[in-house]
Structure formats: structure tokens, C-alpha cells
């Protein structure tokens, strides 16, 4: 289920605010400068709804948690962060591009807030930088759910996108670097200042920072796509060609000179941002301008681009995946394997050989859908190499960093996350601890292994060490 759909279903419930678990001295308050509009949330930084639960059972161990029905469930997480309001969905989580240096994450949720925090528990043995000694920063100012978050290419800025039509940007206040050694410290990274609020007038559906510069793009429910230059906040362009909500956008590698966007109107557009004009526009799952267009069938629900920037994968609301030539927008292959009528919720490309093979060999595309299946497709042949199974819909997929390029982790509505070897389809680990839908997952290296960080529907972000 998409964050937008979930939010609409639950929007009638008033936000429940429990007594704060933290004192004011425990939270870093982000104070806006006088040039910004006043916040709508009545000193939201001061009244705190969450807590950090330090230290789970530890890698390889299992504990128990109680779900909403009072049943006990296994919990093998490494640590937990309960910063968002209880029972308010966390829709998105993103890790710092240099994680674990610093080991920071940013999340966004149904409680109209984002949090910048350290997911690494104090039990990790890292005395210099963990959840116990890094004070979380609450990112306020939205008046509706925060459905997208992201870090700038160098991790010096962070953005939140809300259903209120705002994109809000914060910037690190640089502290004194530790000259004696190169280890990053809490002091260097704990202070963040509010930079600017960017208004679009329509619900934000996705955010994407440029991979090499301080440019931010966002897609909107009203079909527009915006681009801004930061830190100035100046609007670079507003791209208009889609006719329905823009569902996804990416700057294709290697240079990121173009922007690729997708929409519920079934259109895929490659833009030249310098001219604000499409390089090409293709209708993926129905004829262009077809009177039969049905976004619940033909809409593009997910998007990914291959590591070499030559191929895009688009997933439909009805279970189809197409591979597209990014040079001209033509379809290279249609991948049929998911159940008909089941939405493709996640796509990710993986180059198993790290580019060593050339000619596209060794590149796979992993698709996850509401049928609970993850399919590993050989891009070269279009055949299924492996199948990954959950009991409920797959909501998100994260590729793993080198040297674990052969691994992905899937998040699911069945309350679990699973790590797989996509060369064989072998299940490597099942990550338990959530009691509801897992909406998102992010993976990054950590000392002694890999950190898997989740976004949970019950308002908790868990972390596992693999």
C-alpha cells in the first residue's frame, strides 16, 4: 500500500500524543531563522512524543514483542528507534551517503514530522557515535504526512517532502573536526539549521537529490515536477508534460545531466532540465492519449535505472515490468511473471559483476509486487533467475553495497524483512520485530557487517546487523 493511500485511510484519526519521554535537554531543536514562515505545529520541538529504545537483543539473538492483538512475536533486531508518534506510520527512511561515517538516518512519517537520528544502538560497542549519545533532531514545519526524505550527494543537507506540498531543507552546522584522528564525532554532526521551505502547491510524491550537485527534484500529485538549486532555494524549472500524478523520478547515471520521470498517466519522460523540454516521451502500458487509460491498471508505480544509465525499468499497477532504452524511450523487453492486477511496488538494478563483464551481462533487475513475490530478472535474456517470496505484499527493496552486490533486502506487509542471495534465490536472513506493515528499508555498511534499517507502520524504525 502506498503511503498516500495509507494516509488517506487513516487521516480521520486524530494524532494521539503521549507524554514525552525526553526532556528538552535531550533533543536538538531546529530553530528557523526569521526569514522563514512560522511553524504550524505550536512548539512541536518542545513537546516530544517518542523515545529511543537502546539496544535490542543483539545480532543472532531473539526476543519477543507483543503485537496489537496481544500475540507474542519474535524480535531479532539489533536496536529500535521510537521517535515518531506511536501508531503513526513511518513512510520513508534514508541513510547518510557516507554511512557509517557518520551513522545517520532520516525518516518521515504520518505524524507530519521527520527525524534525523543515529540508528546504531549503544550496545554496538561504538562509544563515539551511537543512539545513546547522538541527540535526535526533529524536523518540523509540515502540516501533513512526510512521505519522502533524502540526503544531498555529500550528506551536508537533508530534505523532507510532505503531502502539504512543502519541501523543507536543513543544513549541517559544521563543528570542529577532530584533528587527532579522522573519526567522525557526534559534535561535528549534531547541529542542524533550517534552510528553506519550498512550496509547490500540490502533494509531494517523491524527492530526488542530484548525485553530484546541490540540485533537488520533486514530483507532485498535480503532475508537475520541480527542480531547485540549493542552498539558495531558487527554482530552476517546473516541468509540465505528465497529465496525472508523477510517481517517481531519477537522475540517470553516470553524469546525471538528465531527469527521468514517471506518472500514473503511463508516461515516461526523459527531460533535459537545461531546456525544460522532453528528450523523449513514451507511453508505457497503454497507447498515448488513449481514452481507455486507467491509472489503476496502466499507471507507472515504480522506476529504476541500470548502473550504466542505459536501461530503465518501469513497473505498472497491473503487474507488468518493461525494460526501456534510455537513449530513445523504446521498449526493449516486457517482463511477465507477477500476478495480473498486482502492483509493482519496487524495482532495483544490480550489476552482479561490478561492470566487469560489459555488454549488460551480469546485470539483473529485481521487482517486488503486491503478490508477495520478488522476481530476479536477467536483463540480458529477460528470463527469471530466482524468485523471492513473502506472505504479503513487498513494499520496498534495497540493494546492498559492495562487496555484497549479490544481496538485496525486501520489506513486506507481512511484518518482516528478508535478505536474499539473488544469484540463487537463497534466503540468508529473516529480520523480525515489527508488528505491522514494513513500509521501507535502507542498507549500508557498518563496522563488522551491514546495517539494515526499516520504516514501520507502527511508528518504529528497527535496525538489524547482518
Image (cartoon, grey):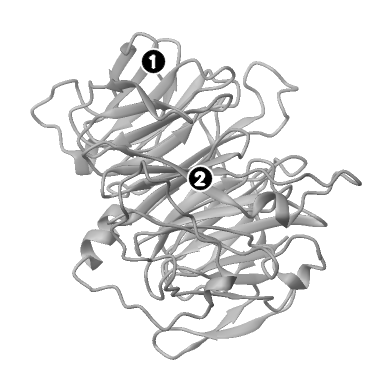
The image position of residue 295, as x and y in percent, is 20, 39
Q: Residue at x 32, y 78 (%)?
A: 16
Q: In 3D space, how far apart are the residues under numbered discs 1 and 2 (Cα atoms)?
A: 33 Å
Which quadrant of the structure image shows residue 419? bottom right
Q: Residue at x 66, y 43 (%)?
A: 174
Q: Kindly state the secondary structure of the residue where label 2 is placed.
A: strand
Q: Which residue is mark 1?
A: 273
Of residues 45 and 414, which is closer to you in this image? 45
**Could you tell me which quadrant the N terminus lies in?**
bottom left
Outermost residue on the bottom side: it is 70
**Could you tell me which quadrant the C terminus lies in?**
bottom right
Q: Kindly state the secondary structure of the residue where label 1 is placed.
A: loop
The image position of residue 67, as x and y in percent, is 45, 83
Q: Residues within 10 Å of mark 2 (few under 14, many from 20)?
A: many
Q: Which is more foreground, mark 1 or mark 2? A: 1
Tell which circle, 1 or 2, labels the residue nearer the N-terminal end: 1
The image position of residue 50, as x and y in percent, is 48, 74
Which quadrant of the structure image shows residue 157? top right
Amino acid at each position: 500500500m502506498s503511503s498516500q493511500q495509507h494516509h488517506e485511510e487513516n487521516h480521520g484519526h486524530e494524532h494521539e500524543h503521549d507524554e514525552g519521554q525526553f526532556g528538552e535537554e535531550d533533543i536538538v531543536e531546529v530553530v528557523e531563522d526569521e526569514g522563514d514562515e512560522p511553524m504550524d505545529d505550536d512548539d512541536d520541538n518542545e513537546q516530544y512524543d517518542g523515545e529511543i529504545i537502546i539496544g535490542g537483543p543483539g545480532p543472532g539473538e531473539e526476543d519477543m514483542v507483543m503485537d496489537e492483538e496481544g500475540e507474542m512475536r519474535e524480535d531479532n533486531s539489533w536496536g529500535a528507534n521510537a521517535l515518531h508518534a506511536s501508531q503513526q506510520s513511518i513512510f520513508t527512511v534514508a541513510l547518510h551517503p557516507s554511512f557509517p561515517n557518520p551513522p545517520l538516518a532520516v525518516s518521515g512519517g504520518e505524524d507530519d514530522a521527520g527525524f534525523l537520528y543515529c540508528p546504531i544502538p549503544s550496545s554496538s560497542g561504538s562509544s563515539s557515535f551511537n543512539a545513546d549519545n547522538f541527540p535526535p533532531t526533529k524536523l518540523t514545519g509540515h502540516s501533513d504526512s512526510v512521505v519522502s526524505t533524502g540526503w544531498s550527494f555529500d550528506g551536508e543537507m537533508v530534505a523532507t517532502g510532505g503531502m502539504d506540498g512543502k519541501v523543507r531543507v536543513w543544513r549541517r552546522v559544521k563543528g570542529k573536526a577532530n584533528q587527532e584522528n579522522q573519526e567522525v564525532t557526534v559534535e561535528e554532526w549534531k547541529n542542524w539549521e533550517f534552510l528553506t521551505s519550498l512550496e509547490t502547491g500540490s502533494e509531494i510524491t517523491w524527492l530526488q537529490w542530484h548525485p553530484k550537485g546541490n540540485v533537488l527534484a520533486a514530483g507532485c500529485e498535480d503532475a508537475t515536477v520541480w527542480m531547485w538549486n540549493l542552498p539558495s532555494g531558487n527554482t530552476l524549472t517546473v516541468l509540465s508534460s505528465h497529465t496525472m500524478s508523477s510517481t517517481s523520478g531519477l537522475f540517470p547515471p553516470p553524469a546525471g545531466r538528465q531527469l527521468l520521470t514517471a506518472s500514473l498517466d503511463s508516461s515516461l519522460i526523459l527531460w533535459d532540465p537545461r531546456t525544460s523540454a522532453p528528450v523523449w516521451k513514451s507511453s508505457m502500458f497503454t497507447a498515448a492519449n488513449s481514452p481507455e487509460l486507467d491509472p489503476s491498471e496502466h499507471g507507472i508505480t515504480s522506476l529504476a535505472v541500470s548502473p550504466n544509465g542505459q536501461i530503465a525499468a518501469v513497473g505498472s499497477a497491473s503487474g507488468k515490468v518493461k525494460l526501456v532504452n534510455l537513449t530513445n524511450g523504446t521498449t526493449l523487453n516486457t517482463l511477465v511473471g507477477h500476478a495480473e492486477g498486482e502492483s509493482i511496488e519496487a524495482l532495483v538494478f544490480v550489476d552482479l559483476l561490478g561492470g566487469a563483464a560489459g555488454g549488460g551481462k551480469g546485470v539483473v533487475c529485481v521487482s517486488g509486487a503486491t503478490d508477495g513475490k520478488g522476481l530476479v530478472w536477467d536483463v540480458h535474456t529477460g528470463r527469471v533467475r530466482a524468485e523471492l517470496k513473502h506472505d504479503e505484499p513487498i513494499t520496498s527493496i534495497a540493494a546492498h553495497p559492495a562487496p555484497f552486490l549479490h544481496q538485496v533486502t525486501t520489506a513486506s506487509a507481512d511484518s518482516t524483512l528478508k535478505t536474499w542471495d539473488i544469484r540463487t534465490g537463497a534466503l540468508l536472513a529473516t529480520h523480525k520485530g515489527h508488528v505491522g506493515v514494513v513500509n521501507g528499508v535502507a542498507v549500508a555498511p557498518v563496522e563488522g557487517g551491514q546495517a539494515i534499517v526499516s520504516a514501520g507502520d507502527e511508528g518504529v524504525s528497527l535496525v538489524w546487523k547482518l
